[in-house]
Image (tube, coloured by chain):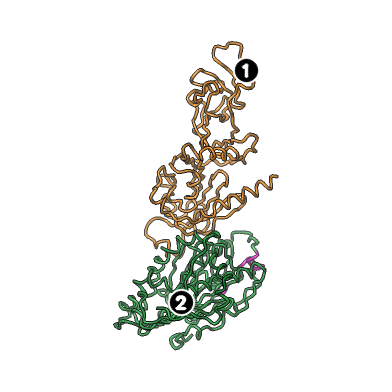
């Protein structure tokens, strides 16, 4: 099963948000993963983010336990072999003096990297087209890990996002303003919300003061969230990127930003403390009881979008 | 005990082919066009726009010079998107009747007041006090909610603490239908008195005669639920199930108990808050199980005849619409007072 997952991830030309930009430096290599594919990520001498398999082809030591050299090569901490992140080729072996020429076979697997919007994204498929650049980098950020497979994480998101993340003072209701649907190659839905505090229970409410619009990439599950008031003014924007990680867990990297203008007292409360957070734990008992709803359609819609996309590409 | 389940044209609904079809239905897939939907109580619509939706299509409702209007975007939001559901001015057809703002979903040129359902116990010009109205929501598909309503056997169990248990001396059920409506009439003799009537209408007798009518306007997903209790009060409920999305239902109800005693008049409309949660406890988990076709067909008993007919009529209407036929073959606005056995003397409008 794990192997199948890995195959799925590596076969799809998906760009996975494997790190936030701040995490990737030229000081220290970062360990990350996409499913069972372990990665090492760092910045080279030009500040460009690089990604390779986290495995030295010499003695299989994790490259993430090595270091980044001043010239931008990543050096294995075991025997000091150094690799070029762009090609993955071996460039130096300590004590080889002037004989630093190696056949092409001497290389580690490198992966394409694209960085924008405050995320470093990696594609496991060679030659994949780079994703569109997102110029906006949201100033609030964080990373959470949950012991729930990404597929289930997403289905939970479609049924009850309140189990996965919180927006300060906001209650998510079960009542959708629009069904989950395919729109411009993404899975789109809108959920009615209420401000926390004294109010009618959502099942008896006539009007809802806020709603959460979500747009989810069908391949990666990366989701753009927009909290809006009843005049459709944006209050908060967030991006959550749930990436499948080892042993069926999921790493969720997220970024968020409050709107410059917040109308109303309830909206202004978002300014106090952290307005957005992704939970590290999920109530398994509640998860087990959660009634499937919008998620029932998810896989079919996802497959349809992917099929359409592949057909148009062909 | 159920003595009789009958309708004038039962054979068309009990053939093996029909039963095979209706026991595997997918209400999630139903999208009914060319219908009036009661999107808001009139009192809920003012100068500030309120947001509603039909099958996820946004409807913003507000008043201009006192007149209710509806569009797919907020006023002043710029160019109106072409959806095929609005007129040349980018507005949805709107009419105000029975204390509701009704919006048309479908071809705007086909919008006709003639297709507005008949609700004879609501004043045509509205004006009922607010305590007779309310809003409840169901996280299920609207047809699931309506099938639940017309299902006569669930109430005695799920709502026994409000409407009484299943015990009665005799019980007769009749089902009538045309291409646009299905009507179920349930007559019980010697039925246990509903607790809500014991406590709030002061009924002291051990049993009462009950005549309950559920009439569903298929296209509008709206139902009449009219109960006559002797001794006791009439309970006339308008029960519209607006499919805001395919799996979420909004119910802006009106229970016109204005002729009942003071206590019952005020309390009974609030029972919806209890009853709706009881219904939701079942319909919410049901709904996702009706999102796809299943190899396992539903079982049914003779008690399900009204619900079975509802399913078949809906499927017929869906098939007609899929073939491009959106015409009304029967008149839904014709007065149905006699059919539902309305005590007209109580509702002179």
Magenta stretch contains residue B217: no
- How far apart are the alpha carbons under marks 2 and 1? 84 Å
In the image: residue B152, left or right of residue B334: left
Same chain assignment for discs 2 and 1: no
Question: Residue drawn 50% across and 52% down?
Answer: A158
The chain letter under disc 1 is: A
Figure quadrant of the C terminus of chain A: top right
Q: Identify the residue at the far left of this view.
A: B204
User: Looking at this view, is A211 or B152 the one in front?
Assistant: B152
Q: Horizontal and vertical percent for residue B137?
A: 45, 65
The dot on residue B225 is 2
Can residue B317 be seen here? Answer: yes
User: Which corner quadrant of the image does residue B202 belong to?
Assistant: bottom left
> In orange, which chain?
A
Magenta stretch contains residue B86: yes
Q: Which residues are magenta?
A: B84-95
> In green, which chain?
B
User: Looking at this view, is A210 or A66 the one in front?
Assistant: A66
The chain letter under disc 2 is: B
Q: Secondary structure at mark 2?
A: strand
Q: Residues within 10 Å of mark 1 (few under 14, many from 20)?
A: few
Q: Is residue A260 above or below residue A85?
A: below
Q: Secondary structure at mark 1?
A: loop
Q: Identify the residue at the far bottom of this view.
A: B345
The dot on residue A102 is 1
Q: Horizontal and vertical percent for residue A168?
A: 42, 49
């Amino acid at each position: 099963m794990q192997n199948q997952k890995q195959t799925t991830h590596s076969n799809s030309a998906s760009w996975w948000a494997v790190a936030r930009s701040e995490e990737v430096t030229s000081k220290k290599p970062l360990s990350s993963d996409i499913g069972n594919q372990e990665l090492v990520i760092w910045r080279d001498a030009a500040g460009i983010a690089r990604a390779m398999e986290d495995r030295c082809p010499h003695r299989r030591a994790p490259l993430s336990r090595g270091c980044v050299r001043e010239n931008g090569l990543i050096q294995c901490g075991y025997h000091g072999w150094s690799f070029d992140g762009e090609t993955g080729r071996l460039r130096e072996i300590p004590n080889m003096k002037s004989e630093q020429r190696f056949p092409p076979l001497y290389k580690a697997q490198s992966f394409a990297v694209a960085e924008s919007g405050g995320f470093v994204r990696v594609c496991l498929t060679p030659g994949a087209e780079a994703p569109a650049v997102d110029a906006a980098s949201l100033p609030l950020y964080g990373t959470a890990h949950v012991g729930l497979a990404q597929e289930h994480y997403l289905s939970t998101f479609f049924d009850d996002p309140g189990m996965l993340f919180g927006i300060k003072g906001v209650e998510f209701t079960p009542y959708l303003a629009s069904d989950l649907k395919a729109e411009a190659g993404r899975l789109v839905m809108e959920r009615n919300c209420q401000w926390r505090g004294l109010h009618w229970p959502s099942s008896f409410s006539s009007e809802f003061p806020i709603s959460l619009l979500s747009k989810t990439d069908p391949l990666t599950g990366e989701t753009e969230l927009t909290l809006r008031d009843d005049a459709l003014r944006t209050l908060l924007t967030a991006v959550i990127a749930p990436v499948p990680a080892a042993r069926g867990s999921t790493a969720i990297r997220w970024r968020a930003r409050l709107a410059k203008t917040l109308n109303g007292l309830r909206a202004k409360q978002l300014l106090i403390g952290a307005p957005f957070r992704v939970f590290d734990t999920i109530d398994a008992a509640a998860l087990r009881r959660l009634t499937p709803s919008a998620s029932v359609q998810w896989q079919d819609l996802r497959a349809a979008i992917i099929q359409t996309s592949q057909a148009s590409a062909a | 005990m159920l003595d009789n389940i009958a309708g004038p044209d039962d054979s068309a609904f009990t053939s093996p082919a029909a039963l095979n079809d209706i026991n595997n239905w997918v209400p999630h897939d139903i999208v009914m066009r060319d219908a009036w939907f009661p999107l808001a109580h009139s009192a809920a619509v003012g100068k500030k726009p309120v947001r509603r939706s039909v099958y996820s299509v946004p409807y913003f409702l507000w008043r201009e010079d006192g007149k209710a209007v509806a569009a797919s975007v907020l006023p002043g939001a710029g160019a109106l998107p072409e959806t095929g559901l609005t007129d040349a001015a980018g507005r949805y057809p709107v009419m105000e009747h029975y204390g509701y703002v009704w919006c048309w979903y479908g071809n705007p040129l086909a919008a006709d007041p003639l297709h507005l359902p008949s609700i004879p116990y609501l004043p045509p010009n509205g004006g009922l006090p607010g305590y007779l109205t309310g809003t409840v929501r169901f996280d299920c598909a609207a047809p699931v909610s309506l099938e639940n309503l017309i299902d006569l056997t669930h109430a005695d169990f799920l709502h026994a603490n409000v409407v009484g248990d299943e015990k009665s001396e005799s019980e007769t059920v009749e089902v009538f239908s045309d291409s646009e409506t299905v009507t179920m009439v349930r007559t019980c003799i010697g039925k246990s008195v509903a607790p809500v009537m014991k406590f709030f209408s002061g009924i002291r007798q051990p049993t009462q005669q009950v005549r309950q009518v559920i009439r569903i306007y298929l296209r509008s997903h709206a139902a009449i639920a009219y109960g006559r209790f002797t001794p006791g009060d009439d309970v006339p409920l308008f029960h519209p199930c607006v499919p805001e999305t395919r799996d979420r239902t909004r119910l802006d109800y009106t229970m016109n108990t204005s002729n009942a005693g003071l206590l019952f008049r005020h309390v009974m409309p609030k029972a919806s808050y209890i009853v709706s949660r009881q219904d939701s406890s079942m319909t919410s988990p049901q709904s996702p199980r009706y999102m796809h076709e299943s190899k396992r067909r539903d079982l049914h008993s003779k008690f399900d005849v009204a619900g079975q007919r509802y399913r078949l009529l809906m499927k017929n209407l869906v098939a007609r619409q899929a073939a491009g036929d959106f015409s009304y073959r029967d008149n839904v606005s014709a007065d149905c007072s006699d059919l539902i056995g309305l005590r007209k003397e109580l509702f002179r409008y």
